[in-house]
Amino acid sequence: AKYDPIKGGTYLPTPDKLASKKAIINVKNRDNECLKWALRAALFPAQDGKNPNRPSSYPIKDGINYKGIAFPTPVSQMDQLEKQNRDLAINVFGWEEGKVIVHRISERKDVKEVNLMLIESGMNQHYCCVKRVSALLFDKARNNKTFYCLMCLTRFTRAHTLEEHKKFCKGENKRPIRIEMPEDGENILNFKNYKKQMKMPFVIYADFESLVIPIKGCE
């Protein structure tokens, strides 16, 4: 049986580093139905952009079929929610150790795409609405426009390079996952399996410095 403890419930404050990106809307709900409020924030933007964090800024009747969906809602139930709402494609990001990770990327195309952020504090987890994916993934180290693969969050500097990458990127076991790059000091690959080398009858060492003709007067 697959163990999937990730469920979004009641309100949690946004982590400072994530809040500084100004990329999400965190609705201050008082129930365990934060998924509903995050979807409403995405589908029915607050009028004139005022008070986007208040539940009162969004309609209760959103037209979404939540039949059979549990609250708090595990990420695994997004498949069922999409099946019941043919016009929705739901992506779920996460925030871990100050970095964006991916929990789920929808396979649906040409329908309304909704991006959610799942934040957590201890055992509590909470869905937020991502209003700007570009701001969420923005890297201050880069000044030029960048393009991201949502399956692995790999960054590209050219759109056509990203399109070529998408043909082959399937995440891990067809699930989205962020690639972890090696840290400084662990990013050098050396050959260590000397015992697996094959002995050769002849070895030639070519030292091109031995062909240099010395010039008189120069040391």
Image (spheres, helix red, strand yellow):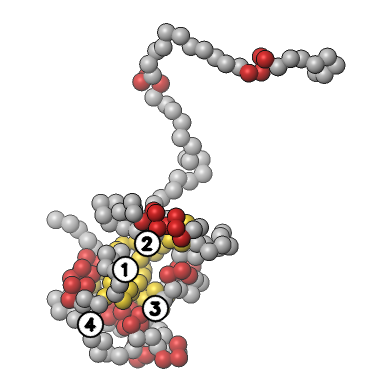
x, y percent for residue 8: 28, 72
Secondary structure type for disc 3? loop
Among numbered discs 4 and 3, the one appearing first in the sequence: 3
Residue 162 occupies quadrant:
bottom left
The residue at which mark 3 appears reads as 26
Reply above or below: 113 against 160.
Answer: below
Residue ranking furthest to the right? 217
The residue at which mark 1 appears reads as 91
Picture disc at residue 203: none
The residue at which mark 4 appears reads as 64
Q: Residue at x 45, y 87 (%)?
A: 49
The answer to whether residue 123 is visible is no
The answer to whether residue 181 is visible is yes
x, y percent for residue 47: 41, 91
Describe residue 212's horizontal placement relative to residue 178 as left or right.
right
Residue 154 occupies quadrant:
bottom left
Label 1 or label 3, whichever lies nearer to me, is 1
Dots 2 and 1: beta carbons under 8 Å?
A: yes
Reply above or below: 64 against 215.
Answer: below
Describe residue 122's horizontal placement relative to residue 206 as left or right.
left
In the picture, the quarter occupied by the C terminus is top right
The residue at which mark 2 appears reads as 150
